Image (cartoon, rainbow, N blue to C red):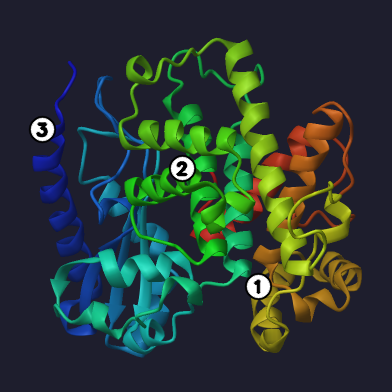
């Protein structure tokens, strides 16, 4: 039975309140300053498919628990996956395609958040569900032009791995339920919009607001900062796929789930994502910033992050090396060399994702790929196996969960 948007709006509020209460009960109200909602749910733009039975929630539910006790923060930071899974179990009327992610932070950590799109959104669009109503005031009030191009690059790289996993080969049964595939496609273009507005210094919270700014910039022509690197074709794709993100319906979007159509869409989205990442990476390096000639991936992959955080980088490698055993950990450390201090494990995972995306677009999935001799974040050989290994590494680092 197809449900209405009103049905979902009534239930989503109850579900979010239940999640907040569950987090308070598990962690303890005395140990928390409060719980707030961020991401697409906070702006009322979550993607939910209402034309299937049961409805499919495509978006992640992003919750942040602000801890008052350092001990409780350390304890529950290692149990984030447990909290998220418990929240998901509260809503049996849905099929979760996304997941409930619970971040655990101290109020001091909120004050130290850097200028990036997600932080900008938290301050301006976050919704307090429990506890102190002043929690969000601890987040710095950045301006759009405070967001650096590095944040645009990280955002695009984070989109690569879900897209790689959505590769529509014979092993994926998208024909019966293709919404997840189309959602991954839509997120490519909505993230390109975020990156473009960040680079132009015009970032805004909300999918519809960003789409409107991109479209308005294209209409302004040469008078817009966006016109220097946003083609009319790319703008039209952002417009189309933002509409699907906001209302994921195959009928209204006129999408076909046949394998040939899915493959064509995947190649198109992957090509656009890689091209925009190359533009941003080259711009950061001062190489052909206006994109007048192609820049190879090898020329810009592995760009250095914050070199001043070498202790944090090394700390991030310790659990990974410890989990590999003596011989393999020594081998991986030797293979990484100075990058143990200049890049985090997630930096390496994202870089490898870009290289795997470039490989499949250039050579196809049948051509073997190079990888780490020690298997992190993936080994060499079969492209599809490398993607699965990369996804497992990424899921463990970013979400503290094993892949489904």
Whether residue 332 appears in this view of the structure is: yes
Q: Position of residue 388 (x, y in %)?
A: 68, 40
Q: Is residue 338 left or right of residue 156?
A: right
Mark whose residue sits in front, 2 or 3: 2
User: Could you tell me which secondary element the residue under label 1 belongs to?
Assistant: helix
User: In terms of sequence position, does the residue under pointer 2 or pointer 1 come before the other?
Assistant: 2
Q: Is residue 137 above or below residue 212?
A: below
Q: Which residue is mark 3?
A: 7
Q: Is residue 51 left or right of residue 374?
A: left
Q: Is residue 270 above or below residue 375?
A: above
Mark whose residue sits in front, 1 or 3: 3
Q: Is residue 340 left or right of residue 123?
A: right
Q: Which residue is mark 1?
A: 319
User: Could you tell me which secondary element the residue under label 3 belongs to?
Assistant: helix
Image quadrant of residue 262? top right
Question: Which residue is drawn at the image coordinates 71% and 44% (left, top)?
Answer: 275
Residue density around tag 2, few if under 14, some if 14–19, many if 20 or more, within 10 Å: few
Q: Please state which of residues 321 and 102 is positioned toward the viewer in this rendering.
A: 102
Is the C-beta separation of discs 1 and 3 under 8 Å?
Answer: no
User: Could you tell me which secondary element the residue under label 2 belongs to?
Assistant: helix
């Amino acid at each position: 039975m197809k449900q209405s948007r009103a049905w979902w709006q009534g239930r989503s509020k109850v579900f979010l309140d239940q999640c907040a209460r569950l987090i308070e009960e598990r962690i303890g109200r005395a140990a928390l300053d409060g719980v707030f909602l961020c991401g697409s749910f906070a702006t009322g733009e979550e993607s939910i498919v209402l034309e299937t039975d049961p409805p499919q929630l495509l978006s992640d539910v992003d919750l942040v628990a602000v801890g008052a006790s350092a001990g409780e923060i350390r304890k529950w930071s290692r149990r984030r996956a447990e909290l998220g899974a418990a929240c998901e179990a509260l809503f049996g009327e849905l099929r979760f395609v996304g997941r409930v992610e619970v971040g655990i932070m101290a109020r001091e950590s909120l004050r130290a958040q850097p200028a990036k799109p997600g932080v900008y959104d938290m301050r301006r669009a976050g919704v307090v569900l429990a506890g102190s109503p002043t929690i969000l005031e601890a987040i710095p009030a950045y301006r759009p032009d405070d967001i650096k191009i590095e944040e645009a690059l990280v955002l695009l790289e984070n989109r690569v791995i879900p897209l790689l996993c959505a590769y529509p080969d014979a092993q994926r049964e998208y024909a019966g339920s293709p919404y997840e595939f189309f959602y991954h496609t839509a997120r490519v273009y909505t993230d390109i919009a975020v990156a473009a507005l960040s680079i132009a210094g015009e970032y805004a919270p909300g999918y519809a607001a960003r789409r409107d700014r991109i479209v308005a910039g294209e209409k302004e022509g040469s008078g817009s900062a966006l016109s220097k690197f946003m083609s009319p074709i790319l703008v039209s794709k952002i417009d189309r796929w933002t509409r699907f993100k906001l209302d994921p319906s195959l009928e209204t979007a006129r999408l076909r789930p046949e394998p040939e159509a899915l493959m064509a869409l995947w190649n198109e989205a992957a090509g656009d994502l890689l091209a925009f990442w190359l533009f941003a990476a080259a711009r950061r390096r001062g190489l052909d910033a206006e994109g007048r000639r192609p820049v190879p991936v090898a020329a810009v992959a592995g760009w250095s992050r914050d070199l001043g955080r070498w202790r944090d980088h090394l700390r991030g490698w310790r659990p990974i090396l410890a989990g590999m055993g003596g011989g393999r950990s020594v081998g991986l450390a030797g293979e990484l060399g100075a990058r143990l201090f200049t890049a985090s494990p997630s930096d390496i995972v994202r870089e490898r994702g870009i290289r795997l995306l470039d490989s499949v677009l250039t050579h196809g999935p049948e051509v073997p790929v190079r990888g780490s001799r020690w298997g992190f974040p993936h080994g060499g050989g079969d492209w599809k196996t490398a993607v699965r290994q990369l996804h497992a590494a990424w899921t463990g680092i970013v979400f503290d969960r094993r892949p489904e």
